[in-house]
Image: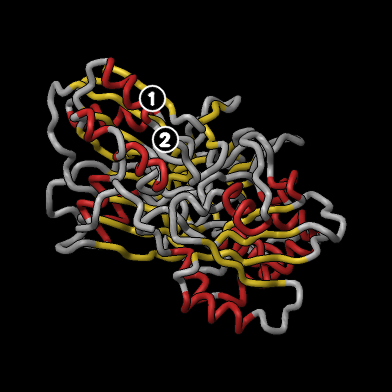
Amino acid sequence: MVLKIALTDHIGKPAQAVVEVGQKVIKGQVIGKTEGDAIGSIYHSPINGKVNDITKDVVVIEPEDEKSNVLKLDDQDELSLIKSAGVVGAGGAGFPTYKKLDVDLEGKGIVLANGVECEPYLLHNKERMKKNPEDIISGLKTTISITNAKKAYIVVKEKEQEIITLLNEKVSDEPTIEIKTVKDIYPMGEERAIIREVLGELLEPDQLPLEANSVVLNIETLLNVKRAVIDKTPVISKDLTLVGRIGEERTQKVLLDVPIGTKVKDLVEDNGGLPYQIGEIIMGGPFTGNQVDLKTPINKATGGIFATLPLPNRENMKIGLLECGCGAQEDRLRQIAEEMGAEVVGIEKCKQAVEMKNGQLKCTDPGNCPGQAEKILNLKKNKAQAVIVGTCSDCSNTVMGVAPKLKLGVFHSTDHVNRTMGDNLVRFLDN
């Protein structure tokens, strides 16, 4: 199985290949790194093999049969080990972890372990908390030490009673670690939502967790911290959830330690293939993921792979789009409209959506949304016959309070995923 390792799976300056075509590499060997002092990451070969192609930002490795243990890191300092291991945010953002942890919380701040996994159908973080709680706690204790934090909270959904019970047992002798819960509503896994719910402080959209004297790390990121510091092994694999029309039945399957660079096609074929017609392949989650093709490789921030039912045919229907700072934004909504054959006649932003410097939207108060009547009325004035919304759970309530009265149809960006899995559509929030 040939691997395609992208050298751009992180926030910051892209990495550059440090190997050559034809060169043999061993598992754990550095194949790419960001040069100089710029924020970036380091990439390692997930397998023993030979480099058979290098493009601007991709190293392609063909496997060889030789078996060996992963090459160990030789740094001693904890932050240096985390940097050398290429640890980045595994929850989707890809921010280099060594940079996030290079802070001093002065014995007062809090480390928040994000185990909320709020995107629907994703299960791999939950599986890790069940399977490797000691490793996650070890990584968390390392981050407490590095950041000079007062204590840490592992945050999970209140419905996950099995995990809560297990984690409480595992931290019973850890005075600096507690378990906290949040309600089961999207987008409770957004880091500012976690800080608001657990620490009682609402940050502005452009503020970082450090403004609340805190650091937020995903569960899998903490596992990778432990592997880097304790095991001295680099990031060469990714946990993910495979969802949808894969194989003969509906699939919702956790895959642990998938080699980075594995193509979606190989994962799908190894798990039953695509015997039925599909609509699209989504990488990420139903709310914030993006359409990819079967040639796309798994990266350090991949969360889910979804194979969906075909989208409904609405050829020539006039459609309005409503962007959300917590969910699908313009590019994704236009992608869905195009798949449906619809004509986009207008676009509006949620009242709480604020545009950041990078052009992306963020919500001023994630999950707590105002009425959208004005936005829906504007789309109606643009001759829209229906709207496609990317709104979060609470915001969808306000859309449904207006659109049907105006005889506007409503499509949500997650509809085809929910239909694929035989579940209810996102319309009204059930309190």
Q: Assess whether mark 1 and mark 2 are in contact (beta carbons under 8 angstroms).
A: yes
What is the three-letter code of the residue carrying label 1? Answer: Glu
Find the residue positioned furthest to the right: 106
Q: Is residue 423 left or right of residue 15?
A: left
Nearer-the-camera pick, 44 or 220: 220
Q: For the residue labelled by badge 2, is the local secondary structure a helix, a strand or a loop? A: loop
Q: Look at the image and tell me in which quarter the N terminus lies.
A: bottom left
Which residue occupies the foreground of this view, 212 or 286?
212
* Quarter of image, res 383: top left
Near mark 2 (Cα within 10 A), the count class, few <14, some 14-19 or many ≥20, is some
Instruction: Inspect the image, locate mark 2, and give the three-letter code of the amino acid beneath it.
Output: Gly
Residue 347 falls left or right of residue 419: right
* Residue hosting label 2: 371
Q: Position of residue 51 (x, y in %)?
A: 48, 45
Q: Residue at x 35, y 44 (%)?
A: 397
In the image, taking residue 112 as reference, residue 311 lies left or right, namely left
Residue labelled with disc 1? 374
Work out whether 396 lies above or below 422.
above
Residue at 23% over, 32% down? 405
Q: Secondary structure at mark 1?
A: helix
Can residue 47 be seen by looking at this rendering? no
Which numbered circle lies on residue 13?
A: none
Give the residue displayed 39% in from the left and 37% down from the top. Answer: 328
Q: Nearer the viewer, residue 194 or 46?
A: 194
**Residue 332 visible in rendering:** yes
- Where is residue 117 shown, x and y percent of the image? 47, 58
